[in-house]
Amino acid sequence: MNKKAGKRADPTPRSFRCRVNDLFRAFSRNAALAVGSAWAFIIAITVIVVWGATGPMFHFSDTWQLIINTGTTIVTFLIVFLIQNTQNRDGKAVQLKLDELIRALQGARNKLVDLEELSDEELKKMEKEFQRLHKQSQETDMHVAKTESRR
């Protein structure tokens, strides 16, 4: 599995639940990487081609169709959980990195750190504020460009 999954800075014993979560995180990360590879796509195409080629041998029966339907349904069902776990973790990591950048920048508004916790109305209000700031910035840029072109 992932080498980082086994190494932790904190040597405190972990509960069974934490160990299971760590194993699942490492497994889902590796599975998402594997499933997203060119080789996984080639294998999937090969399975479909082999299945299609066996159609005449099985007289395109209901059982023949059920095999591919069941197989793809099971694989899709399991992969959705693995990919969702990976996306949740990656999204959280990106959010924490952005929060740290906001916190570290002087003059940045720290109220943006917990932006994902705001209500839809508050987010809409914030979006309008940024649109206004963007428009104001464009107007300032155009004014500066006009002034510089006159020189």
Image (cartoon, rainbow, N blue to C red):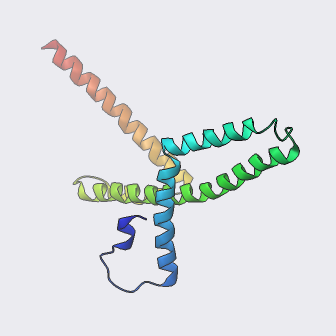
Which part of the image, by quadrant, shows the C terminus? top left
Q: Quadrant of residue 6?
A: bottom left
For the image shown, how many numbered marks are present on the structure? 0
Q: For this view, does 111 lie left or right of residue 88?
A: left
Q: For this view, does 139 lie left or right of residue 50?
A: left
Is 67 drawn above or below residue 132 in the view shown? below
Outermost residue to the left: 151
Q: Quadrant of residue 56?
A: top right
Is 21 drawn above or below residue 75 in the view shown? below
**In front here: 133 or 50?**
50
Q: For this view, does 22 lie left or right of residue 47?
A: left
**In front here: 65 or 22?**
65
* Residue in the image at 43% along x and 65% along y: 1
Q: Position of residue 46 (x, y in %)?
A: 62, 40
Q: Position of residue 66 (x, y in %)?
A: 81, 48
Q: Position of residue 7 (x, y in %)?
A: 33, 73
Q: Position of residue 136 (x, y in %)?
A: 34, 33
* Residue in the image at 53% along x and 60% along y: 85
Outermost residue to the top: 150
* Residue in the image at 32% along x and 54% along y: 109
Q: For this view, does 7 lie left or right of residue 145?
A: right
Is 146 drawn above or below residue 53 in the view shown? above
* Residue in the image at 71% along x and 52% along y: 71
